[in-house]
């Protein structure tokens, strides 16, 4: 898109939605470089940003970050373009026609996509933490056990292999003991 369109969309988003901040670029290489250099929460693109279409830009973005939300905001779309974008994994597709609330719709899509992105990242990080703890529990040379302190009296939930080796008692034998 031309610089004027980019500036207009940027201004409308920032003025109408103070919690949004934007970084405007007008080329595919600028978008990819910005994504490589900065932590972005979402990318908004026209369907025909430059020589590539929005779906081709999405594919370039996925080469750098396979999960950042990507919203197409375009006046140049069609049902076929929307279908192709959805099939390619776009987070949202908003028509930029004369609709008065198009910027509100765009903002809502951005916020929803970013919230889903952040929640997925939190769950992924939490899962990785649990997997690391499980690996450490099962592979340490120290005898470890887990106690359920919510029950009265406290109950043994499980022991690690080092505990079984040291005591000669199996996890199955000890589970549930007080």
Image (cartoon, rainbow, N blue to C red):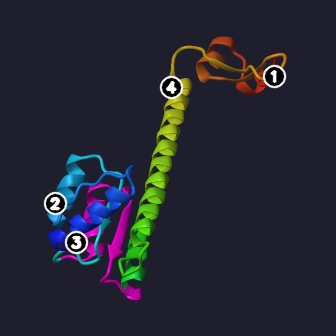
| Up-down relation of residue 81 to residue 125 (above or below) | below
Task: State the separation of the CA atoms marked 3 and 2.
Answer: 16 Å
Q: Is residue 66 visible in the rendered structure shown here?
A: no
Marks 2/4 in contact by CB < 8 Å: the verdict is no
Name the residue carrying label 1. 151
Quick one: label 2 or label 4, which is nearer the N terminus? 2
| Up-down relation of residue 79 to residue 175 (above or below) | below
Q: Is residue 20 magenta?
A: no
Q: Residue at x 25, y 67 (%)?
A: 8
Task: State the separation of the CA atoms marked 3 and 4.
Answer: 53 Å
Q: Which mark is residue 136?
A: 4
Quick one: label 2 or label 1, which is nearer the N terminus? 2
Q: Residue at x 51, y 20 (%)?
A: 140
* Residues shaded magenta: 52-80
| Up-down relation of residue 100 to residue 104 (above or below) | below
Name the residue carrying label 3. 5
- Secondary element type, mark 2: helix
Instruction: Check the picture and name the quadrant holding the N terminus.
Output: bottom left
Q: Residue at x 21, y 59 (%)?
A: 24
Task: State the separation of the CA atoms marked 2 and 1.
Answer: 57 Å
* Neighbours of disc 4 within 10 Å: few (<14), some (14-19), many (20+): few
């Amino acid at each position: 898109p031309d610089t004027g369109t980019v500036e207009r969309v940027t201004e409308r988003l920032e003025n109408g939605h103070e919690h949004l901040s934007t970084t405007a670029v007008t080329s595919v290489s600028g978008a990819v470089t910005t994504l490589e250099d900065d932590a972005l929460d979402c990318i908004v693109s026209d369907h025909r940003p430059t020589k590539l279409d929005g779906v081709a830009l999405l594919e370039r973005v996925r080469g750098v970050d396979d999960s950042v939300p990507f919203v197409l905001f375009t006046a140049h779309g069609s049902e076929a373009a929307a279908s192709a974008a959805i099939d390619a994994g776009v987070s949202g597709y908003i028509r930029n026609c004369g609709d008065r609330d198009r910027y509100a719709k765009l903002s809502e899509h951005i916020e929803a996509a970013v919230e889903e992105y952040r929640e997925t990242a939190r769950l992924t990080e939490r899962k990785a933490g649990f997997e690391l703890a499980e690996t450490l529990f099962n592979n340490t040379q120290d005898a470890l056990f887990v106690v359920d302190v919510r029950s009265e009296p406290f109950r043994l939930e499980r022991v690690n292999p080092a505990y079984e080796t040291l005591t000669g008692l199996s996890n199955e034998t000890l589970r549930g003991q007080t």
